[in-house]
Image (tube, rainbow, N blue to C red):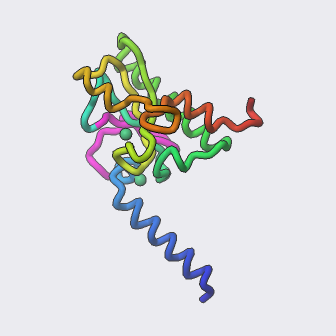
Amino acid sequence: MSDAFGKSVMTMAMAGALSSSCIFCQIARASTTTTLLHQDDKVVAFEDINPSALRHYLVIPVEHIPTVKQLRRRPEDFALVSHMVDVGRALLRRDAPNAEQYRFGFHQPPFNSVDHLHLHCFALPYIPKWKAMKYLSLGPFVGFVEADKLLERIKPSSSL
Ligand SMILES: [Zn+2]
Ligand SMILES: [Zn+2]
């Protein structure tokens, strides 16, 4: 057995172990009691377990992508994030048509709570108001990043 083969088997086994212990991977496979608000082959959506706003949903990729740091300026990543926002916006429009405002974004590490990419989707106001503190942008690469800003960052140059 070559070293390279041994290594890749090991990497696959580790990735499998990581994703099977990831709560969001379990939700994405519909193997929890979490109610899915949306499900397709790319993403699932569900209510945040500890809602911070009038409505607070999470949209996650079915594929285990740890954080925004793994996203690159490439068509598949741009399409995935665009789709996540579209799904979140459609759900909020349906469930909170009279909200003050909608907001979409991601926590950037080290401020992310779960290491499986998740889009926070809010129908505002924040409830209680101080919860807004958890979603402050502290500069382009620190704290919370608006989905629009992230999309600008990963937009493939060919599609400009
Ligand atoms: Zn995961
Ligand atoms: Zn988060």
Q: Nearer the viewer, residue 31 or 96?
A: 96
118 to 126, vertically: above or below: below
Q: Residue furthest right?
A: 158
Q: Residue furthest bottom?
A: 1
Asked where in the image residue 77 lies, by quadrant, the reply is top right
Residue 134 appears at what percent x and percent y?
32, 32
Residue 17 appears at what percent x and percent y?
40, 67
Look at the image and give the residue range highlighted in magenta: 30-48
Q: Write the residue at 36% across / 48% down.
A: 114
Query: Image check: 157 left or right of 15?
Result: right
Q: Write the residue at 45% across / 41% down.
A: 108
Q: Is residue 34 magenta?
A: yes
Q: Is residue 55 magenta?
A: no
Q: Write the residue at 44% across / 30% down.
A: 137
- The dominant secondary structure in magenta is loop
Residue 39 appears at what percent x and percent y?
44, 39
Q: Residue furthest front?
A: 139
Q: Nearer the viewer, residue 143 or 121?
A: 143
Q: Write the residue at 62% across / 46% down.
A: 72
Of the 4 image quadrants, the one containing the C terminus is: top right
Query: Image check: 153 left or right of 116?
Result: right
